[in-house]
Amino acid sequence: MAKPPVDGASQGPAPTAGTVGDAPPAGDGEQVAETEIQAVIDAAEQAAEQDAAAADPARDQRVPFGDRLRRGVSYLGGSVRRNPLFTVILVIAAALRGIAMVGYRPAMFFNDSFDYLHVALSPYPHQLRPDGYSFYLWLLKPFHSFALVVGVQHLMGLGMGLMVYALLRHRFSLPGWGATLAAVPILLDAYQIQLEQLVLSDVQFTFLTVVAVTLLLWKDRPSWRVGAVIGLLIGVSWLTRSVGLPVLLGVLGYMVIRWMNWRVLAATVVACAIPVVAYMSWYKAEEGKFAITESNGFFLYARVYKFADCHKIKNLPVEEMILCTEKDGTRLPNSQDGIWNEASPLNRYTGTRWDPEKNRLGNDYAKRVIMAQPGDYAKTVGHDFLRVFNWNRTVFPDKSTYSQYEFGKKARPLATWPMGSGATAAEEANAYEHGPARTRLTQPFAGFMHHYQHYVYLRGTLVGALLLVGLAGMLPLWRRFGGPAILPLVLAVGLLLAPAATAEFDYRYVLPAVPLACLAAGMAFQADVRTKYARLLFWRKRQAPATKPEPETASA
């Protein structure tokens, strides 16, 4: 390109007195004009490139790594300064999780942990529960570290608190202290931290659900691409725990009442179907049935086990009479005994423990019981649902199970029951770890978490309070079906009700509903709700009769 003329260089003959105002010579004048125009163009292009590089640093491939690091640190520092209270809570929450990891190494185990591990070592479609969590363990298997497994779960826990805080700040404009208060039950609850330290599927399921809800609520009208991501997350959560199906129904129902574009709904359904249908096809190839599991009959039988009265069931098939028990005779004390106890009537049948025929018989029997005794079923479900909101935690369903949800004073030995592969549960856990996997306590860290759990946890009554606050925030927006808060509130109630209706109450089933309940309660303080309540109070004051004291009459 042509360069601008050098300052001081001759640019044509100097004009004389007689030529002032006359046109310059043709050749030199045109050359000067073209050069000056090109110089202006070059300068403008260079300025545009500099502005673009400043606006988007990624376009400038020559930005040193040190500069990028400084920019990242500067952005992080700005976020900390803008959110000081939440930053303090987040740091404390991370420290508590670090103490738990050091105090109970490499991880803590529940009875179900060993089934997940068994599938992770040699994947196959499990008949009792879907394999989503086993896939997670399988992905991390090359690292041979239970500490890594629970470490990622602790990051999921912190991430859930961060998402609740960010959503309430970004979409619903809550002040920093208000959004922080909503995130505290997730970040500081001792039982939540202990659940993250366990090799169990609940944290993964809860994390996937909270991510899906956050994406759906981040904008009033998400795109179909976001809908596809939401559907994929719900599909994976469904394969992690069977209650992912009610989550899908709740999300689709929310999209319908919010009149979202049909492309968003279609993308959500299709994306959800991809992993689910693929898994069901795998199950069909291995077990001969197009399904996710074949265990709903076992759990539903356990639900009706304690109140079933065969004298009230008409036309009960002979093959199902073996499932009958008497209240004061052969019946075991707990509902879960109907599925887990060796003396369960289901084990009177021949075949393997989780035989599909047993599942079919248990399912048909349970449905007959519910139809014959709807009042007893509703009473049992209501009792277990209301147990969620008790102020004190009681030992349930038995001491052995309850103790696995606590930071204990002593290390529990690994289970030694056979896993059907020629190895025991303990041997498979050691094989995954490539070393001793038994939980080892390190003091004083274990002792600190043990005492912390006695005092810092979300009581059941407060869970109910969160739900009531969320409901109160929906009432002024009844014309819009309660606004966006209807999604987390309905999902929270559904996650609490589903175990009571299909299996049995368990404390670990309460925790997945807590982030959603906190979100619904926080949304009750958004500007729209506050404005509605303020107008209502103002209207009531104006409607109240103004009573003024009558003037005293002068005495005669």
Image: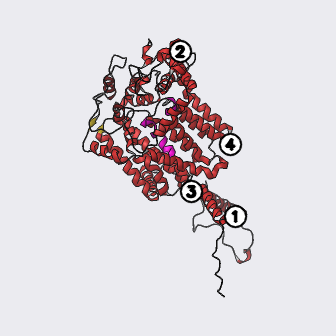
Using the rendered view, name the quadrant where residue 118 is placed: top left
Tag 1, which secondary structure? helix
Kindly indicate whether the residue at mark 2 contacts the one at mark 4 (C-beta within 8 angstroms). no
Tag 2, which secondary structure? loop
Q: Which residue is mark 3?
A: 51
Number of other residues with Cα within 10 Å of mark 3, as a class: few under 14, some 14 to 19, many 20 or more = few
Q: Is residue 331 left or right of residue 371?
A: left
Q: First in sequence, mark 4 or 2: give its number.
A: 4
Amino acid of disc 2: Gly
User: Picture coordinates of residue 473 (x, y %)?
Assistant: 58, 51
Q: Quadrant of the C terminus?
A: bottom right
* 121 up-or-down from 149: above or below: above
Number of other residues with Cα within 10 Å of mark 4, as a class: few under 14, some 14 to 19, many 20 or more = few
Tag 4, which secondary structure? loop
Number of other residues with Cα within 10 Å of mark 1, as a class: few under 14, some 14 to 19, many 20 or more = few
Task: Return the mark for residue 259.
Answer: 4
Q: Which residue is mark 1?
A: 29
- Res. 281 in view: no
Q: CA distance from mark 4 to mark 2?
A: 40 Å
Q: Which residue is mark 2?
A: 288
Q: Tell me the magenta residue range.
A: 498-517
Going by the picture, which residue comes out furthest to the front? 556
Amino acid of disc 1: Gly
Q: First in sequence, mark 1 or 2: give its number.
A: 1
Frontmost residue, 284 versus 142:
284
